[in-house]
Amino acid sequence: MNIENNGFYGDFGGAFIPEMLYHNVNELKENYLKIIESESFKKEFSNLLKDYVGRPTPLYFAKRLSEKYNTNVFLKREDLNHTGAHKINNTVGQILVAKKMNKKRIIAETGAGQHGVATATVCALMGLECIVYMGEVDIKRQAPNVARMKMLGAEVRPAISGSKTLKDATNEAIRDWIANPVDTYYLIGSVVGPHPYPDMVARFQSIISEEMKLQLQEKTGRDYPDRIIACIGGGSNAAGAFYHYLENEKVELIAVEADGLGIATGETAATTQVGSEGIIHGSKTLLMQNEEGQITEPYSISAGLDYPGVGPLHAHLFKSGRGIFLGATDQEALDAAYELTKLEGIIPALESAHALAALHKIDFKADENVVVNLSGRGDKDMETYIRRLQ
Ligand SMILES: *Cc1c(COP(=O)(O)O)cnc(C)c1O
């Protein structure tokens, strides 16, 4: 994938970090490619993906959904992974990198708690200490995930500054990393953060499109689809689903952001629509900010899309026009979740339901092959679904 060049995707990316972080980020930058391209890493990673995560995930031809939209819809079933979403692909990869770098202590930040759970899971698997920073407000909102992290042996530390949400937890994690440069590994959960994180996370998630190529070849006689649709918070499941098709212009790449209550209301997480260029989490990208450059609070019914930026790859796909960016509101996502459940017997995560909601917004030809990346399962969203029962 040469769309990435030394940490930059077009105008976006890089490592805009305080000097005190330079040593840590540079140590990772100097080592990550050597590690992940080594034979021993590749073997361990693929064994764990197979036997622990449960890969390959199926590419399922959704017959009734296809009839409804009069085209061929395939679902890439990331919801069937261990812990219920694509996030585990990345945490398994990074925990192996941390081990090879002799790190003993893992830190992470989490908003909804899903990345925290995926991190606590691999720390338990490897017997490593795990500290997860989480905004005090989010700790209250996401009690079941907090309980999971604790059962898995992680310490959940509340971030009590600012709005007490994800960006404050990120600040705490960065502070911790600066204070503990030798033994600590900072495990980031999406294609965000300073270089090399966006590139490294995209590589770990690229297993999604790697499998898709083989599965499409087998099912359709061609290793690429006409369109791929994925929801986008930070952008890691989309990056993984797009990865091996970034340079194949025959494939339309569609990213779906959370419009929340609607872009006009301001209660939204649709970064490419309401955001502008700036620096967040050490990366130059698109983000939601006020006139003073302070990050503004995003909103979405789905906690995993409630992020005030997009990774630099996606900022580039948006600006260059290579990617098509659509949005789905809370209500559209709920409708799409109920539709998938009723037509296919699959309850999707609210995040993934945003990708499904885009099916309504596209004019398909009858013989097209469309892959929707079903990033996660809906168990964690049952309370919301029941409250809004249709
Ligand atoms: C976290 C999450 C997302 C959003 O994160 P990306 O990095 O944009 O993929 C999407 N779907 C599910 C199920 C998630 O848990």
Image (spheres, rainbow, N blue to C red):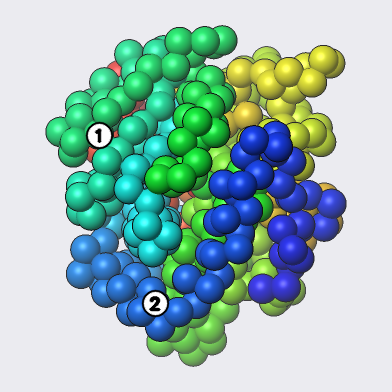
Q: Is residue 303 left or right of residue 149?
A: right
- Image coordinates of residue 137 in percent, x first then y, are 41, 12
Q: Which residue sits furthest front?
A: 182
* Residue under the point 53% across and 64% down: 32
Q: Amino acid at mark 2?
A: Lys
- Image coordinates of residue 236 in percent, x first then y, are 53, 52
Q: Is residue 215 above or below residue 327?
A: below
* Residue under the point 47% across and 86% down: 217
Q: Is residue 233 left or right of residue 141?
A: right
Per the image, the residue denoted by label 1 is: 154
Q: Is residue 367 left or right of residue 211?
A: right
Who is closer to the viewer here, 327 or 343?
Answer: 327
Callout 1 touching callout 2 (CB < 8 Å): no
* Res 303 visible: no
* Residue under the point 50% across and 24% down: 172
Q: Quadrant of residue 370?
A: bottom right
- Dot 2 crowding, Cα within 10 Å, few <14, some 14–19, many 20+: some
Helix, strand, or loop for circle 1? loop
Q: CA distance from mark 1 to mark 2?
A: 27 Å
* Res 45 visible: yes
Per the image, the residue denoted by label 2 is: 42
Who is closer to the viewer here, 25 or 389?
Answer: 25
- Image coordinates of residue 374 in percent, x first then y, are 41, 54
Q: Quadrant of residue 262?
A: top right
